[in-house]
Image: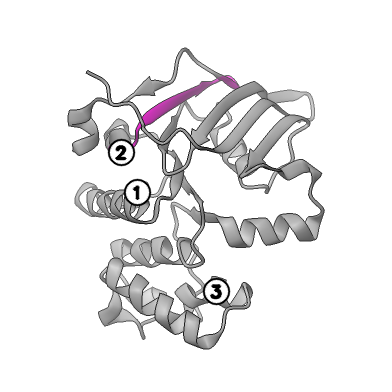
């Protein structure tokens, strides 16, 4: 028996998405939707267009044709300032290599998106305390990234990605630089926080085991979605 994701409210819509670099067609007219709080794994061989698709969803790349709508906002119709504001306030990103700012402490790295969003110091302090507790990194709040283990750095990165309360989390191989045990810990954390905060997630991964936290798998091959999106069964998603 498959597990149907119950929230029918659509957060992200992709219609006829096409992206070309030079003479190479990378994305060939993709169509799919993501519901609020839904977690999707994006899989496919190297060069299939996964990272390009993730960049289009996040507004980093502009498609040559088609639409990406996030909460009803069509990304390609926004000005540069409007797009930057939308990305800053509604999209969180987690990378394979953490991308923490080396000159900032754990506390400062997590607070940085909130400062960019213009939050008050009182609001930042409250949110920071909650996030440090949720990712279990409060004891290293004053440490710099170079002193942290890979797993600790990724937990900081996850907290930072959720700092301003985004509706969509984009994750590019979030466990690709971690050993299996540490990777499982990070995946479990991402699943728990996605559930708690009702954050949708699109996660690029090469590891089939990582898909256990997702409701569906999209397989991208040569710029097209291959077959029908797979739904995870109850046992796998409980994982």
The magenta region covers: 213-224
* Magenta span contains residue 7: no
Depth-wise, is mark 2 or mark 1 nearer the camera? 2
Q: Which mark is residue 175?
A: 1
Of the residues under marks 3 and 2, which one precedes in the sequence?
3
Check contact, mark 2 vs mark 1: CB within 8 A.
Answer: yes
Q: At x 33% / y 50%, what residue is drawn?
A: 195
Of residues 154 and 170, the one nearer the viewer is 170
Location of residue 35 in the rendering, given as x and y in whole percent from the top left corner: 48, 36
Distance from disc 2 to disc 1, alpha carbons, whole Å, reads 8 Å
Name which residue lies at 51% across and 81% down.
103
- Asked if residue 222 lies in the magenta stretch, the reply is yes
Q: Measuring from the top left, give residue 44's x and y in whole percent.
A: 46, 26
Task: Give x and y (percent) for residue 150.
Answer: 32, 62
Mark 2, residue position: 210
Horizontally, residue 52 falls left or right of residue 174, namely right
Distance from Cα at disc 3 to Cα at disc 2: 29 Å
Per the rendering, the mark at residue 114 is 3
Q: Residue 203 appears in which quarter of the rendering? A: top left
């Amino acid at each position: 028996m498959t597990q149907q994701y119950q929230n029918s409210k659509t957060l992200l819509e992709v219609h006829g998405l096409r992206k070309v670099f030079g003479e190479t067609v990378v994305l060939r007219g993709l169509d799919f939707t993501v519901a609020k709080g839904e977690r999707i794994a994006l899989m496919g061989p190297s060069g299939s267009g996964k990272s390009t698709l993730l960049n289009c969803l996040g507004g980093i790349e502009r498609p040559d044709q088609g639409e990406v709508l996030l909460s009803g906002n069509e990304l390609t119709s926004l000005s540069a300032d409007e797009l930057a504001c939308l990305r800053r306030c509604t999209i969180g990103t987690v990378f394979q290599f953490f991308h923490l700012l080396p000159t900032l402490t754990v506390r400062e790295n997590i607070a940085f998106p909130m400062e960019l969003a213009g939050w008050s110091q009182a609001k930042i302090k409250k949110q920071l305390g909650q996030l440090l507790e949720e990712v279990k990194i409060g004891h290293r709040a004053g440490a710099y990234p170079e002193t942290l283990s890979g797993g600790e750095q990724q937990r900081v990165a996850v907290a930072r990605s959720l700092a301003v309360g985004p509706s969509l989390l984009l994750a590019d191989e979030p466990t690709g630089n971690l050993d299996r045990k540490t990777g499982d810990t990070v995946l479990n954390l991402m699943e728990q926080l996605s559930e708690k905060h009702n954050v949708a997630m699109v996660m690029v991964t090469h590891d089939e085991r990582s898909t256990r936290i997702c409701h569906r798998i999209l397989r991208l091959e040569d710029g097209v979605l291959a077959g029908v999106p797979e739904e995870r069964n109850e046992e796998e998603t409980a994982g």
